Image: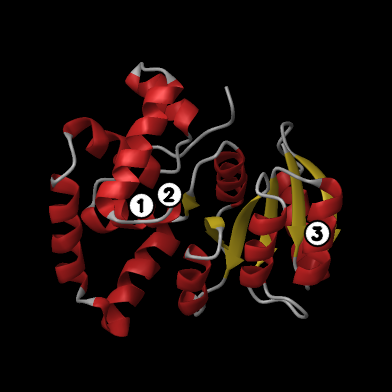
């Protein structure tokens, strides 16, 4: 899996590179110091995943993710965030980002998140998911309890199999990984995912993952490497 790293802080880039370098199945193909350069390098190298800092000069990570989605749809964006950037996370959910990780998180989670997104999944760090739910409540989108109740009602409207698929989406599993766990073909999982998104009224897997976390139906166990 080919990866691009973009962060305006050289030490952060070095840290991310060192962590991802411990995984034999990940290859760093380019590094950028700002969002504009990141988009240019993605066009040139076409990596599987672009790991983007949210706050960067020239073009921030959110705008870079949107431009990458339009220019090179095959490259998925993972956003690196710090505490206090909840508004940016919510913006990024609708601008093409597939994964969200906290810079101060465990190194293993960075590798897990990049692998999951490369496999076509949406990955939300559990800490990020908790913050998104709390921030939605604090921003007037309903109390935490109210949002959880609403999410559970929406989930209950799904079929048993769709709820099972949603629980894996919330944990960051790819279609292939879900298919292996449910012992069905991947095409069947794709159909279930499309139905889940439509019935929940969300646009992408990341937004569905937020609903799964709100409803408390996330399956245990993070997504692992490709098999």
Sequence-wise first label, 2 or 3: 3
Q: Which mark is residue 82?
A: none
Helix, strand or loop under label 1: helix
Q: Which mark is residue 205?
A: 2
Measured as percent of width and height from the top left, residue 146 is found at 15, 70
Examine the image and state in which quarter residue 138 appears: bottom left
Callout in the foreground (3, 1): 1
Measured as percent of width and height from the top left, residue 29 is found at 84, 46
User: Could one spot residue 213 in this view of the protein?
Assistant: yes
| Callout 2 crowding tier (Cα within 10 Å): few <14, some 14–19, many ≥20 | many
Instruction: State if disc 1 and disc 2 touch (CB < 8 Å).
Output: yes
Callout in the foreground (2, 3): 2
User: Could one spot residue 220 in this view of the protein?
Assistant: no
Task: Say if 113 sits above or below 139 in the image.
Answer: above
Helix, strand or loop under label 2: helix
Measured as percent of width and height from the top left, residue 101 is found at 54, 59
Q: Which residue is under mark 1?
A: 208
Q: Which residue is under mark 3?
A: 14
Sequence-wise first label, 3 or 1: 3
What residue is shown at x 29% (from left), y 56% (from top)?
Answer: 201
| Callout 3 crowding tier (Cα within 10 Å): few <14, some 14–19, many ≥20 | some
- What's the CA distance linking mark 3 and mark 1? 32 Å
What residue is shown at x 57% (from left), y 36% (from top)?
Answer: 119
- Answer left or right for 111 relative to 223: right
């Amino acid at each position: 899996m080919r990866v691009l790293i973009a962060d305006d802080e050289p030490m952060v880039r070095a840290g991310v590179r060192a962590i991802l370098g411990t995984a034999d199945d990940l290859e760093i193909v380019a590094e950028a110091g700002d969002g504009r350069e990141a988009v240019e390098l993605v066009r040139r190298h076409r990596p599987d995943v672009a790991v983007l800092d949210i706050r960067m000069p020239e073009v921030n990570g959110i705008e870079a993710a949107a431009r990458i989605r339009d220019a090179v749809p095959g490259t998925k964006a993972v956003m690196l965030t710090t505490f206090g950037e909840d508004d940016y996370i919510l913006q990024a959910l609708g601008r093409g980002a597939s994964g969200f990780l906290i810079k101060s998180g465990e190194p293993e989670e960075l590798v897990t998140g990049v692998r999951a997104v490369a496999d076509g999944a949406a990955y939300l760090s559990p800490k990020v998911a908790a913050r998104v739910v709390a921030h939605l409540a604090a921003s007037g989108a309903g109390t935490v309890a109210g949002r959880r109740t609403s999410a559970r009602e929406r989930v209950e409207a799904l079929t048993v199999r769709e709820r099972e698929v949603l629980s894996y989406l919330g944990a960051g599993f790819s279609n292939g990984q879900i298919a292996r766990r449910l012992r069905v073909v991947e095409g069947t999982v794709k159909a279930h995912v499309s139905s889940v998104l439509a019935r929940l009224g969300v646009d992408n897997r990341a937004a569905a993952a937020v609903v799964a976390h709100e409803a408390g139906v996330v399956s245990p166990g993070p997504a692992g490497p490709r098999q």
